[in-house]
Image: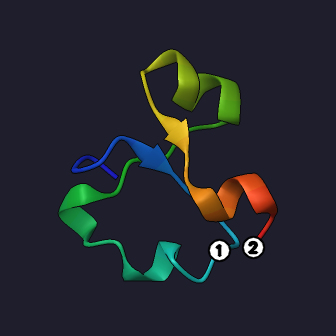
Amino acid sequence: TLDNKKYHSAESHWTRRIKPENLIIFDSESEAEAHGFKPSHYARVGH
């Protein structure tokens, strides 16, 4: 999300809670990280 520079997996239930204006879609984790985003806690533990 734009507001905290964290990314979630597309399958995460948290993804549905992101406001459309804060949603950014990347093709891969490496692309998200190249743009300065870090995995959310849930992305790291596989939720």
Three-letter residue code for mark 1: Ser
User: Which residue is drawn at the image coordinates 43% and 21% (left, top)?
Assistant: 35
Query: Residue 47, which numbered label?
Result: 2
Q: Position of residue 29 (x, y in %)?
A: 68, 35
Q: Horizontally, is 42 left or right of 4 in the view?
A: right
User: Which residue is drawn at the image coordinates 26% and 46% (left, top)?
Assistant: 2
Q: Residues within 10 Å of mark 1 (few under 14, many from 20)?
A: few
Mark 2, mark 1: which one is toward the viewer?
2
User: Which residue is drawn at the image coordinates 81% and 64% (left, top)?
Assistant: 46
Q: Mark 2 and 1 residues: CB-CB less than 8 Å, in contact?
A: yes
Task: Tell which of 24 and 42 is nearer to you.
Answer: 42
Q: Horizontally, is 41 left or right of 4 in the view?
A: right
Q: Position of residue 34 (x, y in %)?
A: 53, 16
Q: Is residue 16 above or below residue 34?
A: below
Task: Tell which of 45 and 9 is nearer to you.
Answer: 45
Q: Position of residue 33 (x, y in %)?
A: 56, 25
The quadrant the C terminus occupies is: bottom right
Q: Quadrant of residue 17?
A: bottom left
Query: Residue 12, which numbered label?
Result: 1
Count how many numbered circles sit on residues in the image: 2
Q: Quadrant of residue 10?
A: bottom right
Q: Secondary structure at mark 2?
A: loop
In the orientation shown, which residue stands out farthest toward the right?
46
Q: Horizontally, is 16 left or right of 41 in the view?
A: left
Three-letter residue code for mark 2: His
Do we see residue 9 in this rendering? no
User: Who comes first in sequence, dot 2 or dot 1?
Assistant: 1
Q: Is residue 41 above or below residue 16?
A: above
